């Protein structure tokens, strides 16, 4: 059984920084991708950043250059460093782990980030 638990959300001022963490319990087989998604009120869930085994990363255009995703293989965790946050970054952020062949797909419960002006 695999569980993903996010932490680090909260209130942050516009222009500030925040780091989200996602700890994984259980074994993830390779190859896989660990990602952060977010869902703002009234909007669909969207991909923020993804980190593939092999250290390839991908970012949404809206966060490119401001957010950084990183994986700690030994700790079985993934992080999202959020810098220069904007009002539009306000959302619930979800951690996702998925195999590249789509044989398994796990989600965390989400952590809320609120950016204040």
Image (cartoon, grey):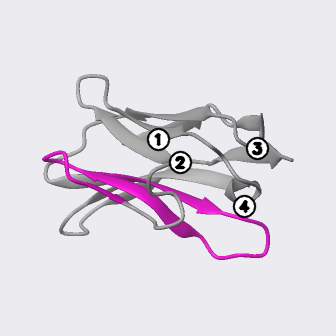
Magenta-drawn stretch contains 40: yes
Is residue 28 or residue 42 the one in the foreground?
A: 42
The Cα atoms of the two marked residues, 3 and 2, are separated by 26 Å
1 or 3: mark nearer the eye: 3
Dot 2 or dot 1: first in sequence order is 1
Is residue 15 or residue 113 the one in the foreground?
A: 15
- Work out which residue is located at the far top of the displayed protein and give it: 75
Question: On the image, numbered disc 2 is attached to which residue?
Answer: 108
| Residue 54 is at least partly visible in this image | yes
Question: On the image, numbered disc 1 is attached to which residue?
Answer: 4
Please tell me how crowded label 3 is: few (under 14), some (14-19), or many (20+) other residues with Cα within 10 Å.
some
Dot 1 or dot 4: first in sequence order is 1
Residue 54 image position (x, y, % from top left): 13, 47
Q: Is residue 33 above or below residue 44?
A: above
Residue 10 image position (x, y, % from top left): 75, 35
Magenta-drawn stretch contains 55: yes
Dot 1 or dot 3: first in sequence order is 1
Q: Secondary structure at mark 4?
A: helix
Residue 75 position by quadrant: top left
The Cα atoms of the two marked residues, 2 and 1, are separated by 5 Å
Q: Which residues are magenta?
A: 34-58
Question: On the image, numbered disc 3 is attached to which residue?
Answer: 14
Dot 3 or dot 4: first in sequence order is 3
Residue 109 image position (x, y, % from top left): 61, 48
The Cα atoms of the two marked residues, 1 and 4, are separated by 25 Å
């Amino acid at each position: 059984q695999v569980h993903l638990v996010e932490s680090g959300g909260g209130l942050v001022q516009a222009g500030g920084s925040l780091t989200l963490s996602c700890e994984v319990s259980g074994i993830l087989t390779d190859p896989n991708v660990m990602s952060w998604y977010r869902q703002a009120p009234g909007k669909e869930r969207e991909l923020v950043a993804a980190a593939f085994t092999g250290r390839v990363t991908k970012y949404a255009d809206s966060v490119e250059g401001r957010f950084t995703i990183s994986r700690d293989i030994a700790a079985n965790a993934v992080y999202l460093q959020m810098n220069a946050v904007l009002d539009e970054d306000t959302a619930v952020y979800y951690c996702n782990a998925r195999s590249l062949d789509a044989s398994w797909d796990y989600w965390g419960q989400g952590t809320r980030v609120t950016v204040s002006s």
